[in-house]
Image (spheres, rainbow, N blue to C red):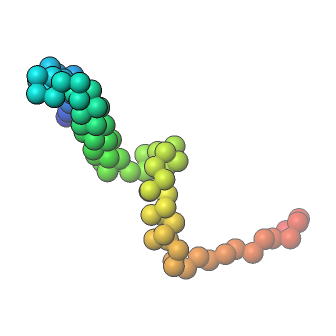
């Protein structure tokens, strides 16, 4: 519910931002709104990832920074390797 409300508010806010900025920025409104929207929606997506960072493996595949951090921090951890059993055992 909160997440949905935040997403809708952000969409409406970014949708009305050009109306407010057009008098001040003129043709620069388009790149300015694109940049601001990209930043804000990116922050919102980061918030979703922080709330549920490992919800599925596809989320990890789409977030290379998380995969990199996982590899980095698990590098020095001891790993117990199991021997393979001979066939028929």
- Asked where in the image residue 25 lies, by quadrant, the reply is top left
Q: Nearer the viewer, residue 12 or 80?
A: 12
Answer with the quarter of the image where residue 73 lies.
bottom left
Does residue 79 lie above or below 67 as drawn? below
Q: Residue at x 49, y 45 (%)?
A: 62
Q: Quadrant of the C terminus?
A: bottom right
Residue 67 in the image: state x and y as whole percent: 49, 57
Q: Point out residue 28 in the picture as x, y percentages from the top left corner.
A: 23, 29
Q: At 55% across and 79% down in the image, what residue appears?
A: 78
Report how many numbered discs are placed on residues in the image. Answer: 0
Q: Nearer the viewer, residue 14 or 62?
A: 14
Q: Is residue 33 above or below residue 19?
A: below
Residue 75 horizontal/vertical position (percent): 53, 74
Q: In the rendered image, which quarter contains the N terminus?
A: top left
Q: Does residue 77 appear in this view? A: yes
Would residue 20 appear left or right of 7 to someone viewing this image?
left
* 57 horizontally vs 33: left or right: right
């Amino acid at each position: 519910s909160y997440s949905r409300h935040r997403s809708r508010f952000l969409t409406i806010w970014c949708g009305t931002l050009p109306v407010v900025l057009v008098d001040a920025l003129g043709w620069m409104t388009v790149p300015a709104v694109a940049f601001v929207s990209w930043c804000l929606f990116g922050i919102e997506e980061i918030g979703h990832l922080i709330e549920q960072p490992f919800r599925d493996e596809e989320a990890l595949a789409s977030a290379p920074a998380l995969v990199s951090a996982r590899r980095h921090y698990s590098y020095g951890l001891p790993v117990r390797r199991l021997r393979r059993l001979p066939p028929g055992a």
